[in-house]
Every structure is written in structure tokens, then in C-alpha cells.
Amino acid sequence: MSNTGYLDALNAPQREAVEALDGPLLILAGAGTGKTRVLTTRFAHLLAMGKARPWEILCVTFTNKAAREMRQRVAKLIGDEVEGIPWLGTFHSISAKILRKHAELVGLKSAFTILDTDDQLRLLKQIIISLEIDVKRWTPRHIASLIDGWKNRGLGADKISQSDGWGFADGKGAQVYQLYQQRLQALNAVDFGDLLLHTLQIFIKYPDVLAEYHRKFRYLLVDEYQDTNVCQYLWLRLLARGSNNLCVVGDDDQSIYGWRGAEVDNILRFESDFPGAKVVKLEQNYRSTAHILATAAKLITANQDRLGKTLWTDEDGGEKVKVFGVWDGEAEAIAAVEEIENWYSKSNSYEDCAVLVRASRQMRAFEERFISLGLPYRVVGGPRFFERLEIRDAHAYMRCVMSDADDLAFERIINTPKRGIGAASVQKLQTLARTMEMSLMSAARRIIETDEIGGKARNGIRTLLKDFEHWRQMATMTDHDRLAELVLDESGYTAMWQNDKSPQAEGRLENLKELVQAMGEFDTLPEYLEHVALVSERDTGNEDDQISLMTLHAAKGLEFPLVILPGWEENTFPSQRSLDETGNKALEEERRLAYVGLTRAKQQAIIYFAANRQIYGSWQAVLPSRFVDELPPEHVEARAETGYYGHQARTNTDSDSGANYDTPGWRRFQALKSSAKPYIEGTARAKPKSADGKFALNQRVFHDKFGYGRINSIDGDKAEVSFDKAGTKKLMISFLKNPDDL
């Protein structure tokens, strides 16, 4: 290639980044600043300048989608030669290619198998049982997550510290890891984490192999560098020693995956890791309006650990970011969907609109609203609320309470959680039910009186049937939402997810609590289940023009003209669970997540916070997120939704609903309505305190026995606390601790 006309389309910093070909380079690329264009153009420029041939460039992405997009863009610039780029792909695909060539160095054959998640969990379960570890407490999924975490940190089974190894699986964590790796080797298999870890170990132990790749790769290009974990970081550093021509593209302000091993420090220390490194900042944004960018820029400046940059645009100011205070979650969904309908009425599309939530449990209210109005929508990155596994399981239990003839529901939950009722026992039940022309549950009552099924399975069925008899009796004297809580607890279903330490478990528990809340909005259980059935079957229309509903994490890399950001309240956003686990480090990542949410918006961004939320079945006052206070007033339009704060659903039922109208959240809400500012004076945060002044209403606390919780009420030296896992307890305040002091 000799024609470099492709450079003419670049702005000055972009061109600087493309033309700085030799030596280490950090391209600090803000949201919407054209980083992919720069990366692909740099690839083409290396070829045009004769610096490298296509097979001498290693280009690493994080997803297959990003790799395909890169390949397509490069193809437009260099034509047919795109087929000769063998080293453009994800970390895992490139590592697999290297590992197959050198598999024998780590005791494998080149035709090794890459295990999927199900095979990995089955193998781990066998090992856990063989070591006589409590499989209910230390589930295969939990252990898999721990092992994956060790591999993300570049730690082989022989490198686990005593504290790491003894802290898990009844003190046998390191032993499980070692046996797991031995079994994988015997099976000539690897998991995803092994692809990188084995390759890293080869580079470290065999300098001649590393030297081979030093000669092969003259230039290295890396996308989304802020998302690299320790293992990927070490892998790249070793490969970069060959030429020192390492170019990484990333944005420290968009590092939001710490929970899965990403280390923002990797990008923060790039200049010290690679002395003499050049840094080019891409700050001109081609996506969002000036008001949106200024709002996001002001918010992120509260973070201390960042390299620093400020996004700007040539476009006009556009609409200010809207911040709306609403009465509760129902009012929030009504107001937000009305904004979407107003947008659509102006000849815009539904696909222009996105609702970005912090937690999946927040989706339910929006899904209900979309369905009731017949609006088309898609859930991105996961199933719809009523299609989630834990929700379907809970519904199956409640359907069985209503009817012992619901075979599909009974079959779904007969061994969930585990009761020792295997597939062979279920098959016997099905055979008997068909022969006797009766329901599965009726067949179960018959079979436990015979010797057809013995031991643990028979006891499991007998106990389950007694439980259903008890629950049906309770159904005549208990509200159906309270009954659902009772069924989930007494069946062991809630405990099953509490004992599951996988990253998904906490979200499933939150969804179950949201489900119980949703049930309370209906007069009877049959009415609720009928509603669910109708919702599940309803067609939402044109699949090509749908509102997007997703978590903030799933929105990374996407953009929409209209973005709705609900639930900006303390404890929800920032997530209190994250703050409890890693403190200020988590707070900064939560703020980066807010920054990502705002910078998804091209034309309009609308933030909502509520004065009250129904949490764990009871109404609680909530405070606006600290992130609301950090927004710049000059770029924000703030107001209370006066049409919704006294919504009809609450107007005449104040005393029955449990909502407290004289609360800090409500006072702050009223002040916001009158002042039309995005923040309220500190006096609005005043809360009743304990006699010693150490604790206040709504404050997060810790108890040695019951764990983390929140203060509901204070009475002298006593407090009522809603604990995350232990329920509501009345305690002496002297037994409570401040989580910040732990």
C-alpha cells in the first residue's frame, strides 16, 4: 500500500496516534472518540509504511464481535490481504492457537478439548464429593468461580498461597484446584482460563518459545486495555519485550469489570511499566451533546484513580440532562415510559431508546409497563424477568400449591433444590401416573407407600408432599405474597441460592424478592399467575423496532439517542453490596459505571430517583444517590414529577401501604420539587440517631451473627434492623458495628 488518503479523515490526535508507529504507545480513548477507527487505521498504516507484513502484527480484542468488526474495517482499507491476518482475534482464540502448537510443554496433546461450563461443573462436583467437602456449602459453581479467579491472577495450582488455599472448601481449596488440574490433564482438556494460563506458563518456563514469538510479532495492538486482568497483563508484557512496539487503546474511566478480574491499575501504570511511552488522548466526542458530555465529565472528576481527560464536542449544546424525582418505582416506570412515548410520537423509533438499570431486578417494573401498553422491547444480555430460571422455579412451586394436577410444575421442582430424587425415580413416577391415569403428585402419594422407590428418594418425596399439604393450609389464612416467601424459605430454595457463591446468585436472590413484591400488587394468587401467563404469551410486535432494556454493564460499547437511567438512589446505585465488599475501590468503579451510562446517550439522558422503594416487602424511604449531588447544575434540568408523586395507587392507602411521608427522602424530594436543583442542602439528609450518636435511621450496619443489614427504626438503645440474609431483628445498638470500621 502506498496511498495514505485514509489519514485525511482523522482529527489531529487520531492522526498522531496512527502515525506514532514505533515504541510503546497508550491511546487514551474516551467514549465515542473513534478508538476503533484509530486502531484499524493504525493497522493499515503499519502495512502501508512497510513496517510489517499482515502476519507480523498481533492484534488482540476482548470479544469475537470486536474481532470481526476489526477484520471487516481492515478489509476496507487493505483489500484482499485481510485473509492473511492470522493473529487478529481475542485473547482466548490467540492463546488457543499458540497452545495447540506447544501443548506438550504443559503435558497436553495438540488435539486437547476445551471444556464447556457444564462439563467443568460435573468434573468439579466429582472432586468435591471425593474429598468429602460439603457440596451444598461449597458448590461446584462457587469453586469454579474461585479457580477462575486464581487463573485470572496468573496463579497455577502450585502457586496458591496458604491463605487463599485454606480459606475455601473446608480448608481444601488448593487441593481441589490441584486435583482439578490433574483430571483435566488426564482428560487432555482445558477450561477457558487454562488457555491463557498455560500459554503464560510456557512463555515463562521456555524462553526459546517466547523468543520465537518475539521474532514473529513485530507490532502488538491491544483493544480495551483497561479490561485486562493480571494474567492477560503478564501475557502481553512478556510478548512486548521482543520489539517494545506495544500500542494499547483504552479508557480508565470505563473500567467497570473489576468483579470479573479486570485491573484498572494496568492502564494507570502503563507509563511506568513501559518507560518512554507516548500517551495520546482522544477527547473529541462524536456521539453525545455538549450538555451530556459536560455532565459526565464533571461526575467522573470525583474519582481519584484516573489519568484524566475531558470529553468535548463541536456540536451544539442540545438538551440538558434531566434529573427527575418521583414518588416510587411504579411512578418511575410510568414517567420513563411516557418520555419514550413522547419520543416515539415525534417520528422517532423505539430502537433509539434504552433503559439502563444497575441491577436486573429493576427491569420488572419496566417490563410490566411496556407489556401493559403493548410497547415492543427486548432484554439485552439475558432473559426477560418472568423467563429467568429462579422466577420460573418460584412460579412452579406456587402453581403446585394451587393445583396438585400441574405435572409440568411438579416435575420442574421435585428435585430443586436437591432432595435425592434422581431421574430414575421421576421416570417411575411418570410411568405410574400414565398407567393409573392420575397426576404426578397423586402418583407420588401412592408410590411412597410401596418399595418401588426407596431410601433418600422416598424420604425426599414424602417430605415434599407434607410441605405442600402445609402450604395449602397456609394459603387459606396467609396473604399470597407472604405465602410465597414461606414456600421459598421452607422448601430450601432460598437457602440454595444463599449457599451458592457464584456471581449470579446474589442477583437471583434479589429477583426473588422483587417477585414477592410483584405478587403483592395482585389481590389473589390465581389472579397473579394468570397475569404472568398472559404476559409470557403476549407478542410485543415488530422485532426490528424495540426498546432496549439492559444492565449498565451490558450497555458498554453501545449508544442510543435516548437513554433512561432509573434507580439513582443510595444502596442501589452505588451498590451497597459492592461498597461493603471493597469500599472506595468499589465506589470509584460504581462512579465509572454511572459515567458509562451517561455517555451511552447521544441526544437525551434522563435520570430518575425515587423517594420511596418497596424493599424486601416493606416500604422504605430512600435517599438520592450521591452521584446526583455530583452532577453540574448548569448542565442539568432537575424537577420533581408532580403528576406522579401522589400517584393514585398510593393516594388513599397511606396508612395501609406502610409508606412514611415524613422521611428524609420525601423531604429531600419536596425540596427538589420547589428548588428545581439537582441537589439539596445537607439538612435534608438529617436522620434520627441513636442515643450515642453513632448510628442513624437507614444506616448500613454489621452484626457478628447476622451479617450486614440496615436500620429500620431506633428506640433509645435498641434498633430494628433488616438484615440481608437473616431477616428483621430487634437488637441492642451496642452490638452493632459500622461497616466502615471493619
Image (spheres, helix red, strand yellow):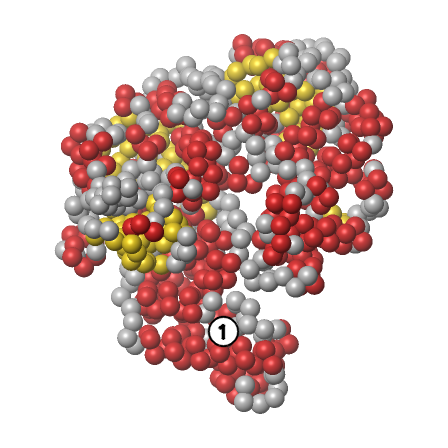
Q: Nearer the viewer, residue 252 or 370?
A: 252
Q: Nearer the viewer, residue 269 or 309?
A: 269
User: What's under tag 1, amino acid-wise?
Assistant: Phe
- The quarter of the image holding the N terminus is top right
Inspect this view and state whether residue 549 appears.
no
Q: How crowded is mark 1: few (under 14 residues within 10 Å), some or many (20 or more)?
A: many
Question: Hey, which quadrant is residue 269 in on the image?
Answer: top right
Question: Hey, which quadrant is residue 684 in on the image?
Answer: top left
Percent position (x, y) of residue 387?
A: 47, 57
Percent position (x, y) of residue 259?
A: 52, 40
- The quarter of the image holding the C terminus is top left
Can you identify the residue that label 1 sits on? 410
Q: In this view, does 623 lie to the left or right of 113?
A: left
Q: Residue at x 60, y 52 (%)?
A: 168
Q: Residue at x 55, y 68 (%)?
A: 418
Q: Which residue is drawn at 26% across and 29% down?
A: 678
Q: Which of 523 and 124 is in front in this view?
A: 124
Name above or below for residue 253 compared with residue 91. Answer: above
Percent position (x, y) of residue 646?
A: 17, 47
Q: Is residue 541 left or right of residue 53?
A: left
Inspect this view and state whether residue 565 appears.
yes
Percent position (x, y) of residue 703?
A: 38, 51
Total numbered labels placed on residues in the image: 1
Q: Is residue 505 left or right of residue 513?
A: right
Say which element carries label 1: helix
Q: Which residue is drawn at 57% across and 14% down?
A: 279
